[in-house]
Amino acid sequence: MNFEEIYDATPDGTWEAPGRVNLIGEHTDYNEGFVMPLALPHTCRVEAARREDGVLRLHSADIGKGVVQLRLDALAPGSPEAGNWAAYPAGVAWALREAGLGVGGADLHFTSTVPVGAGLSSSAALEVSTALALNDLYGLALRPEQLARISQRAENAFVGVPSGIMDQMASACCTAGHALHLDTRDLTQRQVPFDLAAQGLRLLVVDTRVSHALGDGEYAARRAGCEEGARALGVQALRDVSFEGLDAALERLDDPVVRGYVRHVVTEDRRVERAIGLLDAGETRAVGPVLTEGHVSLRDDFQVSSPELDLAVDTANGAGALGARMTGGGFGGSAIVLLEESETDKIGEAVNSAFAAAGYLAPHLFEAVPSAGARPL
Ligand code: ADP
Ligand code: MG
């Protein structure tokens, strides 16, 4: 069904916002550290029309449910709609109004090509596309980073997922042909040229199509562990522990689990720095081993990998990839593989065969082409 069939009206406009992969800098955003995501060509598209009666109507082509109808002035965290998919766009409308912005009703219809629950940020794409549509329908003139903050507020306070700012910033601020180097403490950003094709390289996404249910609780546990580490070390956030001071800091921590978390975050911030240095120097191939080091750190120190992710990474590397790692929060989801373009088929086949031999679901493989952030169509 299209917008006209659902709402018996024509949309005022169409907007879209992409999913993302994170090149490097994982579980660093809620530690006020550094990340480097790039936007995917996969987007959440929203057609939208303004309404003057304070009613929000939501429909997703990707969910087998009908239209969700809500009154804006009745929206609050914990209200019934906070339990399902509609909480994401409703939360954005709520967060805009909470920020004192003059947002009224709207009819919204979503269609998304971002795989859902694959660690590729379908949720941020849904939020940011909503924020941009409402921004334009109501002439709010918010900047992309403001749209990202509103979207994060929706996810944290309305949906109830304690995510960092990376996903929404990636969806709102990335540009085609670039990775986004972001300081999550103050949102300082730099667009880093990331034109792999020109160098005969590719970035492959391996969506394992597995998302382990324990992910949510484990994510919260990692956050709590990082906060505990920061408290024990007397810093505002783990970002403030220097790489040079890491060994001394680790000696001051009693809990081996927290020690592992701290070591991951501090070395991961360092890996972002190293990757940036290599990209700036035109040594893109040398980023591969940095990715693999990041994976080992996420697997062993931070303990957020999964057997499927480890198999994808180990198989790709064993078949000649330049480097690979899990991307996103972990416990399933997707891995990325940096490889020579000429090796794409060979490495893809190796991953497919390894998954078949292990009795896993067949993974989805596709190329991550660095694409544009949220935009009107
Ligand atoms: P990820 O962001 O990694 O894809 P999340 O668990 O953060 O995974 O977000 C997935 C949730 O976002 C879905 O369960 C659903 O509630 C919502 N969602 C994402 N895309 C859509 C869509 N196109 N239509 C409806 N809901 C969606
Ligand atoms: Mg998400």
Image: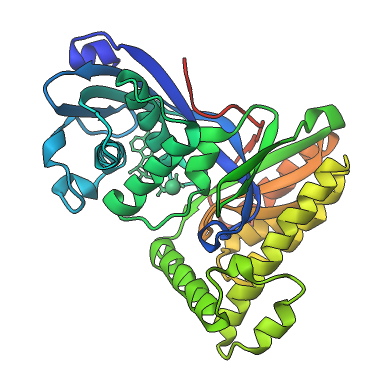
Coloring basis for residues:
rainbow
In the image, 281 versus 314, the foreground residue is 281
How far from the left and from the top, in percent, is residue 303? Answer: 57, 71
Q: Quadrant of the N terminus?
A: top left
- Extreme residue in the top direction: 10
Q: Position of residue 14 (x, y in %)?
A: 39, 16
Q: Is residue 50 above or below residue 191?
A: above
Residue 201, quarter of picture: top right
Q: Residue at x 50, y 79 (%)?
A: 231
Expressed as whole percent of the image width and height from the top left, the position of residue 189 reads 63, 41
Number of numbered discs overlaid on the protein picture: 0
Asked if one can make out residue 318 in the rendered structure from this viewpoint, the answer is no
Task: Give me the residue at 75% from left, 33% from top.
Answer: 193
Which residue is outermost to the front? 100
Residue 271 % position (x, y)? 74, 59
- Residue at the spot x=88%, y=39% of the render? 282
